[in-house]
Image (cartoon, rainbow, N blue to C red):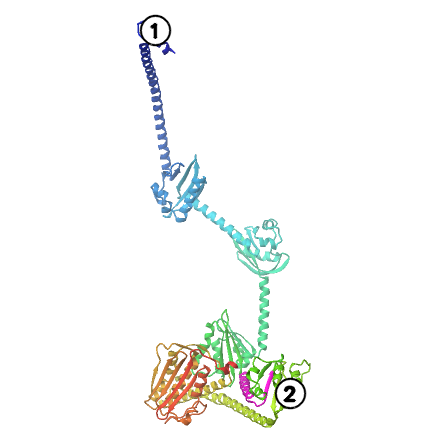
Amino acid sequence: MATTQAADAAQLSLSAYGLTSFQVAWFSALFGAVAFGVANAVVLMRSRRRFQALTNKFKIENADLKLRLDRFESLLDTDDQRLVIWDGRSSDPLVIGGLDPACGAPRGAQGLLAFGNWLEPGSAAQLEADVDALRQNGQAFTRTLPTRSGGSVEASGRTAGGWAVLRLRDLSGERLAQARLAESHARLEQQIATVRTLLNELPGPVWLRDADGNMNWVNKAYADAVEAKDPEAAVQDKAEFLDAAGRKALSANRAAGDSFQARMPIISAGERRVFDVIDVSGAAGSAGMAIDINEMEQVREELKRTVEFHARTLDQLATAVAIFGPDRRLQFHNAAFQTLFGLDSSFLEGGPANGAVLDAMRAARKLPEQADYRDWRRKHLEAYQSLEPDDFWWHLPDGQTLRVVANPHAQGGVTYIYENVTERLELESRYNALTRVQGETLDHLSEAVAVFGSDGRLRLHNPAFGAIWQLSAEDLADSPHISTIVGICSRLHPEPDTWKDLTTSVTGLAENRSRTAGRMERPDGNVIDYATVPLPDGGTLIAFVNATDTVNVERALRDKNDALREADQLKNTFIQQVSYELRSPLTNIIGFAQLLSDSKFGDLTGKQAEYTNYIMSSSSALLAIINDILDLATIDAGIMELDLGEVDIAAAVDGAVEGVKDRLVEADIELRADVPDDIGVLIADERRLRQVLFNLISNALRFSEKGGVVELTCTRTANDLRFVVRDHGCGISEEHLQEVFSRFVGHTSGSRRRGAGLGLAIVKSFVELHGGTVEIQSQEGVGTTVICRFPIQTRIPEREAAE
């Protein structure tokens, strides 16, 4: 307003001096601008003085704050700690303070923040997780962390004014001890909690008492046993699990400072049960627990009764049983075992070792005669290392035959079962012989025989049945019904009444079935006698006989049957004589010869030793002959079983050659064996295969002259394995060539004595048992060749398979 008035006044004064309006306006504007500039200059000067004063004030305050910050940093540096501060805006934290290098923390800020470089791996990962939780969620923490150098630091995290602060302090001296004590205390608390949780889950009562004997903790099983609501109620009510006598005995042991262990009956949850009570004392009190063994005692008593029952049952068995424990000592034997082997009862009650029992059996002549008893004994005791049952056949010197089954236990030990099969073998031999005789007899009878089942269908017939009624193979195929058979047979004998009676005999449902008989006079002039025989299984046998030849057939059957019985009796008598009359004295001869050759009983002269060796060699040869006879008898009885497995052909040939080396040297004969390296294996009985090769080579040696050569060749084809044994001796005449496989038929071989005549017979029997064939070729003055063919896959002969 003043400026405007001044301008107006100036304008009026200028107007008074004769100035124009424009000039007046221009001078007015100039004067206003100068006035405005002067006013601004005055205001600026005043503001500058005020700002200068504020700046000086702020500098003073900043200097004071910086001084205070330096003082605080100095104070933090003097305290043995380091602070890491995150302000939430910058990723790089502020690191303040210092730590003793001995604790393992680096001096540099970057090294300090790399926790994994100076802390244990687990501690570093835990600290990083805690720092992340602190910065993101403001979650505070305090931890004691071990360093890689063996020291310890305390890490604590807090938030202050929106900042995250990590403080690291070196733990040493009392602080370290206190931290470790706190850590140990926490660990012990956790362990005690874990142990109490475990004890709380135990099925048996557990209790803890203080030094004064007052109950301070029990588990759930204790509360259930004393019928308390819960463990706390049991402690509060001072409910005692043990009775007065038990507590008295326990207090006496606690006063003596000993542990208490006893088995006692206790009332638990209203039921009388048996417990094993254990109580131990310590400086702070005692602890005890009770283990319920009531069911175990019942099971033990039941097991004891079961074992006693089984022992009584085994004593009633006619089969001998012996049980040996894991220590190979006799634990049990039944009465049949002692009776069978005739061993002293006091010896058996002493729990002898298995080897000692075998030695006692050998002394009592209750073991098979063995050329090498020690090796046989060792192999017999291998049952303790076996996982599967095994069985052996013992042919005793007294003529008995035992089937010995060795059954290993899963917990160790072996159970031996000694089955006396002497009578069974004899019966089986007779039965098999009788079955073969009956089968052959039935097929070769002139009488027609037909067997019909309970359903009226044909089950069995012989060739004579088809021949006498002119029935073709198609007519008898697929087990035709008797009505079909009658319809076909009616063509030769059209008498309905006779066929009706036969049909009724087969298909009738009468309660009392009886035999019927009759005669048919056929239009073709033949007279047929028939008879029906009801069988125990509900079937019916019908026999048709041509009456014209009845007498002749009956006489032939009677003579043939008598001859078979006589032959069977002669064979059995001969086997008994061989096994008893020969083996018994032979065993004595071998035993005394071994005793004479033993240096413990005195030295022998050269001649005496030579004669003793002759005795032993001859006895062994005789024993081999007897064993061959027994093998043939076993084969004839139809009970010979092959122990089939993969046989290394080269090893089998080497084993057979090893058995005749001494004879080769004695006879000055060269054996040339040609066995290809890739001959491979054969599915066969290794022992019998070696016996075949041994007999073939022995037979070739017998027919070879001194300085001669015996050749053994083995070749494999697609279907069989062929062994060829050739000698260049005197050969066999044509008239004797057909008898070489007969038993007890021997021939002289030059200056050598004739053999027993069993070698080639055994070879033929064993090869045929494998499903193979034997062929012999010989020419006098040139030599003999024996060819044995074994199939690649052993086939059981049809005769044995049928049996």
Q: Which three-letter amino acid code belongs to the residue tagged 2?
A: Pro
Whether the magenta-drawn stretch holds residue 110 is answered as no
Neighbor class of circle 1 (other Cα within 10 Å; few <14, some 14-19, many 20+) is: some
Most prominent secondary structure in the magenta stretch?
A: helix
Whether the magenta-drawn stretch holds residue 427 is answered as yes
Of the image marks 1 and 2, the number of the one nearer the N terminus:
1
Give the numbered dot on residue 12. 1
Report the residue that reaches farthest toward the right.
Answer: 511
Dots 1, 2 in contact, CB < 8 A? no
Residue 384 position in % (x across, y down): 47, 73
Please report the bounds of the magenta region as a residue range.
Answer: 422-451
Determine which residue is flagged by label 2: 494
Residue 281 position in % (x across, y down): 53, 54
From the image, which quarter does the N terminus lie in? top left
Residue 732 position in % (x across, y down): 39, 92
Q: Which three-letter amino acid code belongs to the residue tagged 1?
A: Leu
